[in-house]
Amino acid sequence: MVILRENSIFSHNTHNMRSLISSYTGMETSISNEKLRSIAGALLNNLYLDQEVPKEKLAELTFESEFQSLLEPQEKLIKMSKKEHIDSFFKDGTLRLGTFKDYQKSENEEIGDKSEGCLLVIGRNSKRTGIAHISSGFNNFVFCCFDGEADQTLVGKFDYDDYFFIDNPNGFAQAIADRLPCPNIYRSRCVYRNDKVLVGTPPPNFNFYKMSHELRNLVNWGQYFIKPVRFSHQKEYRFIWELDEDIDEPFLMKCPEAVEYCSRPAY
């Protein structure tokens, strides 16, 4: 038996749009990875589910478990910006937190990403599988960094002219969270994929039959850290602060407590 719902939109409630679901497919069986690649490929390319999907259209899958080894930076964690903004941060803790909406509409090809927060999520347990197209992150503040040695060429591509180091990512993230405040903090290196498809494992009692905002929980927070492969040169490390309400615009805040976890390069 297959349950199929398409072209429906659901939000958390009438006031908060923490996730939008544009389509949902539920199946009373646990689908293999090979079959998931085919189904996801069909959905991403607007193909029929009952026909064979060409090999080049099979979807690339990302699994929640992959993020377990990505929580810490591999190298130096660098925040690129304009020198005047970095001066302000080290003076009184002034920081700008972005939003997914902000990145979706940016015209800078290194910053703008219309797919930010949008992906195909697949929840699969031992008995059932659910697949949904979602848009999320409406209640998230985002702070993006570079995980690696300073690259002046890349700094210039972002239209920046300076950078600083985040020496203690956990302390930095918590200091900002205490100022907001927010219930959840996520941080991780990003993964870069040809397709934004995340496979998760919902709990045994997960309701695959109910069309609601709970479908966003088919997968975990890894949904915020998958980016198109064309951005792979950025080696992005991302901080996410998840609030209890939706966010319309970026936030310019003062958090002097965060400064102690950062340092400037010795020029």
Image (cartoon, rainbow, N blue to C red):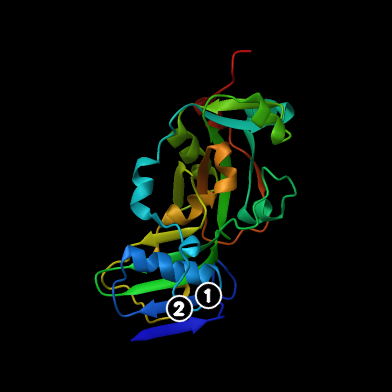
Residue at the extreme bottom: 1
| Amino acid type indicated by mark 2 | Gln
The residues bearing labels 1 and 2 have C-alpha atoms spaced at a distance of 8 Å
Instruction: Give me the residue at 30% from left, 75% from top.
Output: 128
Q: Residue at x 32, y 73 (%)?
A: 206
Toward which corner of the image does residue 93 lie, by quadrant? Answer: top right
Q: Are marks 1 and 2 in contact (CB under 8 Å)?
A: yes
Q: According to the image, label 2 marks what residue?
A: 51
Classify 10 Å Cα crowding around label 2: few (below 14), some (14-19), many (20 and above).
few
- Residue 117 in percent (x, y) is at 56, 58
Residue 217 picture quarter: bottom left
Q: Is the C terminus in the top left, top right, bottom left or bottom right quadrant?
A: top right
Task: From the viewer's side, name the closer residue of 90 and 17.
Answer: 17
Which residue is situated farthest in the top direction here?
A: 267
Residue 244 x/y as whole percent: 51, 60
Q: Residue 214 location, x and y as percent?
A: 43, 71
**Dot 2: what SS?**
loop
- The residue wearing badge 1 is 47
Q: Quadrant of the N terminus?
A: bottom left
Asked whether residue 86 is in view, the answer is no
**Could you say which is closer to the camera, residue 230 or residue 146?**
230
Of labels 1 and 2, the one closer to you:
2
Q: Horizontally, is 127 left or right of 67 in the view?
A: left
The crowd level at tag 1 (other Cα within 10 Å; few <14, some 14-19, many 20+) is some
